[in-house]
Structure formats: C-alpha cells, structure tokens
Image: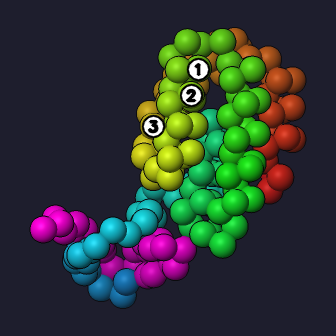
Amino acid sequence: MKSTLRISLKSGERIFINGAVLRVDRKVALEFLNDVTFLLENHVLQPEDANTPLRQLYFIAQMMLINPEGKEQSLVLFRKSVSMLLNCFQNEEILAELKRIDGMVASGRAFDALKAIRGLYPTEDRILNSQEITPATIEQIRKEIAPWR
C-alpha cells in the first residue's frame, strides 16, 4: 500500500499540480493518494527573481514541473545551462552538486533537483559576493540561459 501525502494550504495560497495552478479560497488540507508532481507557491521562483546563475537554473527546472507541455524544451535549456555552469564555477561543492542535480533531472527527479539547487544558494551568494566569478561571466550566463530576462 502506498503512503499518502497530506499538505495544508492557507486561504489564498496557490499550488501547482501536474501543470495546473490551483488557488484555495479557504484553509484546506489536501491528501494525495497517488504519485503527483506539485510545487507549493513559496517554492515557485518568479522570473524577476532568477537573478543569479543557480536561480536561473532553478527557474528552468521548475518550468519542467509547472509546464509539462514544454518539458522537452526546458530540458534542452537545462542541460545547456548545467554545461555552462560547470565551465564557469570553480567551487568543488557546486561542481559536484551540479553533476548530481543533472543526474536527478535526467532520471525524471526535477522536484529533488529544485531542493538541491536551493541548497546551493548560500554558497553561490558567497562566491558572487567574493567575485570568484566575474560580473562579465555572470552577464554572459544570463544572456545564454535566461531568455525571459
């Protein structure tokens, strides 16, 4: 017997389920009885907030979950982005984790990849603040992998 997943939402909160966006008008608890792909609103990154290389990668990965019809296009962009980031970063933790994240996405685990990418934000912020990556490199990455900007 599969276990169920129960989540609670507050009034006005949104959830993205298998590409659909739902907003609840009152406090509600949802119980998923089978496998489902979902994102809670507080895990959805808005385009204007995808302002660092890893946040841009996160945005692309989240599009695979939010927009299943465009999943193949997002996957191509994701793979291109990971390749560029592997060539730009020098931090061993980020490089190892990017390879692991790439494997997650390749095996259909985009949700797990999002969590792993979020875990790298503090390291990325430290690197960007110390300028281990030049502003010109960051701008080049933005132009290549962030067509929405």
Question: Disc 2 on helix, strand or loop?
Answer: helix
C-alpha span from label 2 to label 3: 11 Å
Kindly identify which numbered label has been placed on residue 95: 1
Q: Are marks 1 and 2 in contact (CB under 8 Å)?
A: yes
- Residue at 83% x, 24% y: name it: 137
Question: Disc 3 on helix, strand or loop?
Answer: helix
Q: Where, quadrant-wise, is the N terminus in this rendering? A: bottom left
Question: Disc 1 on helix, strand or loop?
Answer: helix
Relative vertical location of residue 101 with respect to residue 75 in this rendering, above or below: above
**For the residues carrying marks 2 and 3, which lies nearer the camera in this image?**
2
Relative depth, front residue between 103 and 90: 103
Residue 10 vs residue 134: left or right? left
Give the image location of residue 83, x and y in percent: 73, 31
Residue 124 vs residue 26: left or right? right
Name the residue type under label 3.
Ala
Give the image location of residue 114, x and y in percent: 49, 46
Kindly identify which numbered label has been placed on residue 99: 2
